[in-house]
DNA sequence: AGAGATTTTGATAATCATTATCATTTGGAA
DNA sequence: TTCCAAATGATAATGATTATCAAAATCTCT
C-alpha cells in the first residue's frame, strides 16, 4: 500500500497542515505509476478502486485539486475538452509540446522547446509578458498512418 | 434584419437542403458583427435576443453546430475550458496564435506563423503527419501590466 | 493507549452547460 | 393555398463537477 518516494509527499502534507490518508497516497501513486498515459478523472477513479474499493469519486476530485494546488501534479489541457494529469517537474511542464492523434487519440510528448525566439518577438511586439505557453499539434500518428 | 454578405450563406443553406430562417441569419450576423470579441454561447444568446426576444437557447446551440459543420465558423479552443467562435477564413484559422491574459482574460490574436520549421522537424522525427496546431501564450497583457 | 478536536471521507443532492425529446410552427415546393 | 418535412421553443434528460453533511479517520495532547 505504501510506495516509493512518497516520504516527501507525506512531509509536504504535514507541513501544510493536511492529514496523511491512504486515499491521498494511493491516488498519487496511481498517477505516478501511469506517467505517459493521459488519464481522466474517471480512469484514475477506476484504478484507485483496485486498491481501495470503497473510495468515492468526490475524494478523487478533491485529491486531484489538492495535488494541483500543492504543485505536485499539473492538469494539462489538450484542447477539445480533453486533458490529462502529469507529475510536476519543477515548473518545467511547459518545456514540451504535445502531438495529438486525431484517429486513435494517442498523446505523444515532444521534449523540446523551439519557441524562445518567437516568445521574444511576441513579447516585444505586443507588450505582453509571457508566463507560459501551450503548443499542440493535431494530426495522424505513425501507427495510424500505416493502417 | 437582413445584413451584408449573407447571400452566400442563404445559398449555402439552400444548396445543402437546409431552410433559411430568421434565427439562422441573425445568429450568424451577431457573430460577424462581434469579430475580435470572444463570445461564448450564453453571450451570443443574449445578443440574439435583442433582435429576436423569443429565441430559445437550444436554437443557438443547434445553429452554432450547423455553422461549424458548414465551415462558416470555427470553434476555437482557448484551453482551460474557454473557447470562442470566429468566422472561418478558408481554413486559415491555424495561421494565428492567441495571447491569453491571466489577469483580465483578454484574448489577442497574433497574425503570424513561425512554426513551419518546427513542424518539419517534428513530423520527420516523430513520423507524425501534422494537420493543424494550436499555440497559446499565457501571461499578462500591456493594460494589466501598467496597473 | 485513549479522548477529543478537527479534518477527511463517502453518499448523495445540487449545479451548470449541453443535448434530446416532442408538440407546434414555419419554409418553401407543388 | 395546401401540405409535408424541417426547424423551433419549452423543457426534460444527461454528464461532469461541486457542495453538503453525517460518519469515520487522523493527529495532538495527556
Image: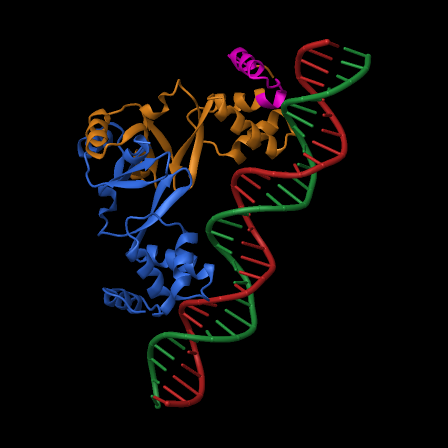
Chain colours: A blue, B orange, C red, D green
Q: Is residue B118 above or below residue D2?
A: below
The magenta stretch spans which residues? B3-24
Picture coordinates of residue B117 (x, y %)?
A: 20, 26
Q: Is residue A7 magenta?
A: no
In the picture shown, does residue B10 fall above or below B34? above
The quarter of the picture where residue C7 lies is bottom left
Which corner quadrant of the image does residue B81 belong to? top left
Instruction: Residue A27 in the image: state x and y as whole percent.
Output: 36, 61
Task: Answer with left or right where residue C5 lies relative to residue C23.
Answer: left
- Looking at the image, residue A142 sits to the left or right of residue B65; the answer is left
Instruction: Examine the structure image and report whether residue B9 is included in the region drawn in magenta.
Output: yes
| Position of residue B91 measured from the top left corner of the image (x, y, whole percent) | 38, 21
Give the vertical position of B27 relative to A34 (above or below): above
Who is closer to the viewer here, A72 or B42?
A72
Q: Which residue sits at x=44%, y=65%? A: A53
Q: Quadrant of residue B105?
A: top left
Task: Kindly identify the residue that appears in the image at 41 percent across and 26 percent down.
Answer: B36
**Which residue is at 39% across, 17% downward?**
B90
Q: How many marks?
A: 0
Amino acid at each position: 500500500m505504501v510506495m516509493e518516494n512518497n516520504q516527501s509527499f507525506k512531509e509536504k502534507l504535514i507541513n501544510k497542515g493536511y492529514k496523511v490518508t491512504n486515499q491521498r497516497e494511493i491516488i498519487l501513486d496511481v498517477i505516478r505509476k501511469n506517467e505517459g498515459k493521459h488519464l481522466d478523472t474517471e480512469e484514475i477513479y477506476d484504478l484507485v478502486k483496485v486498491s481501495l474499493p470503497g473510495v468515492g469519486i468526490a475524494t478523487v476530485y478533491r485529491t486531484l485539486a489538492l495535488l494541483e494546488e500543492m504543485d505536485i501534479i499539473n492538469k494539462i489541457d489538450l484542447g477539445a475538452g480533453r486533458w490529462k494529469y502529469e507529475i510536476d517537474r519543477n515548473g518545467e511542464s511547459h518545456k514540451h509540446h504535445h502531438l495529438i492523434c486525431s484517429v486513435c487519440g494517442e498523446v505523444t510528448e515532444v521534449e523540446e522547446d523551439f519557441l524562445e525566439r518567437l516568445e521574444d518577438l511576441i513579447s516585444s511586439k505586443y507588450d505582453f509578458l509571457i508566463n507560459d505557453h501551450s503548443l499542440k499539434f493535431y494530426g495522424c500518428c505513425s501507427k495510424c498512418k500505416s493502417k
